[in-house]
Image (spheres, rainbow, N blue to C red):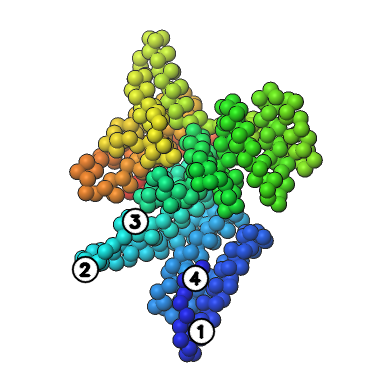
């Protein structure tokens, strides 16, 4: 990473150049260690680079390149700390990186504004630091997902996607289409772990489609296309019984494994299990035999994946709520019943249509409708809690919070829009109240999720600008 310029000789400059060289050497060793020696060694090198930057800052406190170098280093440390299991440290590092990049955004915007006032010809679109901030948020979303904090992870994912959308990465034939594919690949894994599996599938499918449009999955894309997107799409298409689609993606995974230096037993196990579950035992046998030569554990792993029970998607929850309330009304039970047409309208608005819905912002067709939608989701969430359907309640209430978050960010970005005033506070409080009830029930039941969700709700309150109770 060439950030620092060379300077003339003097005793002070010699110390500065020595610290710069130490930083560069340790940083580059850290990046190399990630590929060969693993995250623990990478983190050790990044810590050495951090000490070198501290010495550099002390020797030359006004050096303008230090903040960018420090932000990039914190970004790298965030991944390494996540990979060694230090999620707390990862989030702290990425918080600091975000703060530094946001300062750079402000400085770049101020410079652009000064140029516009002078009449200089200016580049349009977001300033460069916007994309650096978006990448930090994507990496932090992964850390939060590892921590099982749905709101925090999915809010960061939404902001990351939004940053690249504003940069034009999602427009047809964009020169940043590879960035869009990368973000959606990671997003697929995040959605699958802590979000909505239907959004996970949409992220993964779109990521793979973009890589194919760019001419195929090259070596630089394999960590994302094959490491994130393809396994998610394969798993979810198989879960839906869409065998042709699942096996087509399985073929991509096998091709990448055979071209790489690693073994292909996992890819053969995936294909073999899927063929067997599709009733194509004769075809499955050869793949399962090849998988077994590498490791029987791979076959068991794929069997567990196929047999895993997915948390309900928002669409599935709302569809079931609509059916339940219709049955209650048909049976003459009106006390506490919700309006089935209202639930149907909500489902079609948030989950229907052909539009790309990769995150909460993608669900938001009309921002002014969000308060009403969130209030409805909160009521449904309370009903689901009352009927002891806690996973469904979790999906509904956390989606309500994410909609509030998306709407609040939209209003901040569109302050000049006459329609940008959206009364969110009452709806936010209802969603948070329902989520707090759910977490309290989980805590009293000794559910291990409760601690993570309690912290997640605290972060949701902070991001929504609400005081803690």
Between the C-alphas of marks 4 and 1, the distance is 19 Å
Q: Closer to the camera: disc 3 or disc 1?
A: 3
Q: Is residue 9 above or below residue 360?
A: below
Name the quarter where the C terminus is drawn: top left
Between the C-alphas of marks 3 and 1, the distance is 37 Å
Q: Mark 4 = which residue?
A: 2
Q: Closer to the camera: disc 3 or disc 2?
A: 2
Which residue is depicted at the point 38% across and 31% down? 350
For residue 230, side relative to residue 349 (left or right): right
Q: Closer to the camera: disc 4 or disc 1?
A: 4
Between the C-alphas of marks 2 and 4, the distance is 30 Å
Q: Mark 2 = which residue?
A: 118
Mark 2 / mark 4, whichever is N-terminal: 4
Q: Secondary structure at mark 1?
A: helix
Label 2 Cα neighbours within 10 Å, binned few <14 / some 14-19 / many ≥20 = few
Which residue is depicted at the point 42% across and 13% down? 327
Please state the horizontal and vertical placement of residue 165, each as a whole percent of the image: 38, 47
Q: Mark 1 = which residue?
A: 15
Residue furthest to the right in view is 293
Residue furthest to the top in view is 331
Label 1 Cα neighbours within 10 Å, binned few <14 / some 14-19 / many ≥20 = some
Q: Secondary structure at mark 4?
A: loop
Residue furthest to the front in view is 215
Q: Mark 3 = which residue?
A: 126
Between the C-alphas of marks 3 and 4, the distance is 23 Å
């Amino acid at each position: 990473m060439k950030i620092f310029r060379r300077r003339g000789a003097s005793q002070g400059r010699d110390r500065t150049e020595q610290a710069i060289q130490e930083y560069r050497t340790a940083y580059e060793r850290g990046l190399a260690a990630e590929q060969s020696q693993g995250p623990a060694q990478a983190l050790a090198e990044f810590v050495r680079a951090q000490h070198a930057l501290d010495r550099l800052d002390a020797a030359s406190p006004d050096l303008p390149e230090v903040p960018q170098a420090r932000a990039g280093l914190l970004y790298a440390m965030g991944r390494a700390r996540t990979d060694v299991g230090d999620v707390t440290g990862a989030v702290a590092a990425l918080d600091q990186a975000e703060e530094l990049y946001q300062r750079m955004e402000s400085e770049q915007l101020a410079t652009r504004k000064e140029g516009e006032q002078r009449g200089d010809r200016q580049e349009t679109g977001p300033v460069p630091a916007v994309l650096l901030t978006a990448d930090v948020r994507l990496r932090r979303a992964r850390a939060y997902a590892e921590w099982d904090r749905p709101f925090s992870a999915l809010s960061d994912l939404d902001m990351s996607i939004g940053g690249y959308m504003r940069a034009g990465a999602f427009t047809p034939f964009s020169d940043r289409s590879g960035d869009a594919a990368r973000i959606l690949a990671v997003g697929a894994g995040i959605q699958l772990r802590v979000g909505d599996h239907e959004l996970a599938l949409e992220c993964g499918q779109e990521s793979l489609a973009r890589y194919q449009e760019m001419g195929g999955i090259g070596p630089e894309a394999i960590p994302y296309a094959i490491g994130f997107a393809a396994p998610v799409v394969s798993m979810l298409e198989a879960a839906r019984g869409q065998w042709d689609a699942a096996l087509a993606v399985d073929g991509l995974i096998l091709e990448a494994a055979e071209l790489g230096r690693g073994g292909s037993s996992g890819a053969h196990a995936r294909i073999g299990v899927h063929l067997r579950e599709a009733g194509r035992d004769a075809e499955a046998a050869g793949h399962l035999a090849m998988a077994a030569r590498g490791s029987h554990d791979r076959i068991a792993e794929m069997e567990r994946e196929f047999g895993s029970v997915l948390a309900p998607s928002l669409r599935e929850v709302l569809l079931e709520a609509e059916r339940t309330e219709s049955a209650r009304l048909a049976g003459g039970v009106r006390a506490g019943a919700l309006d089935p047409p209202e639930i149907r309208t909500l489902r079609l608005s948030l989950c229907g249509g052909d539009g790309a819905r990769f995150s909460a912002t993608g669900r938001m067709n009309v921002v002014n409708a969000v308060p009403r939608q969130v209030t409805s989701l909160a009521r449904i969430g309370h009903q689901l809690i009352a009927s002891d359907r806690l996973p469904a309640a979790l999906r509904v209430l956390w989606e309500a919070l994410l909609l509030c978050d998306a709407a609040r960010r939209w209003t901040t970005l569109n302050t000049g829009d006459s329609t940008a005033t959206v009364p969110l506070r009452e709806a936010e409080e209802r969603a948070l109240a329902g989520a707090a009830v759910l977490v309290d029930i989980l805590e009293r039941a000794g559910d291990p999720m409760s601690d993570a969700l309690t912290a997640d709700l605290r972060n949701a309150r902070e991001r929504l600008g609400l005081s803690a109770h």
